[in-house]
Image (spheres, rainbow, N blue to C red):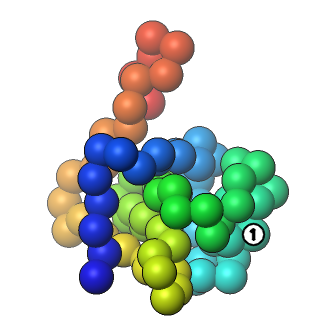
Amino acid sequence: MFSLNESQRFYLCLSPTDPRKGFDSLCGLVSSELGRDPLGGEVFIFVNRSRTTIKLLHWERGGLVLYHKRLESGRFSLPTCDGKRR
């Protein structure tokens, strides 16, 4: 079961991500873009260019979990970075 809590670390990939990417491609991005271990138990967040699709990748005991949500209307808001809203 996919479970998240405040004790976990969350990492947002700042470059837009193709929503067709699966487990292996996203693990590659975690390693190359974020410099992290995809099997480390942290949660990795990926958003597409139009901010209508979000994917969360997380390692839990026994395997990887991928949560995928596509908005029918509206956009995901990204957190404020360096005082700028994206």
Front in this rendered view, residue 17 or 50: 17
In this rendering, the count of numbered labels is 1
Front in this rendered view, residue 33 or 85: 33
For the view shown, which residue lies furthest in the left direction?
Answer: 73
Left or right, 57 with reference to 25: left
Residue 33 visible in the displayed image = no
Could you say where residue 35 lies in the image, as x and y percent from the top left? 76, 49
Could you say where residue 12 lies in the image, as x and y percent from the top left? 52, 46
Residue occupying the point 49% across, 22% down: 81
The amino acid sitting under disc 1 is Gly
For the view shown, which residue lies furthest in the top direction?
Answer: 83
Q: Quadrant of the C terminus?
A: top left
Could you say where residue 59 lies in the image, as x and y percent from the top left? 51, 73
Front in this rendered view, residue 23 or 71: 23
Left or right, 37 with reference to 73: right
SS at mark 1?
helix
For the view shown, which residue lies furthest in the bottom direction?
Answer: 62
Residue occupying the point 21% across, 52% down: 74
Left or right, 33 with reference to 47: right
60 versus 75 height, above or below: below
Question: Badge 1 local density, few (<14 within 10 Å), some, or many (20+)?
Answer: some
Q: Quadrant of the N terminus?
A: bottom left
Residue 18 visible in the displayed image = yes
Residue occupying the point 31% across, 75% down: 2
Left or right, 71 with reference to 43: left
Mark 1 lies on residue: 28
Residue occupying the point 61% across, 62% down: 40
Q: Quadrant of residue 18?
A: bottom right
17 versus 22 height, above or below: above
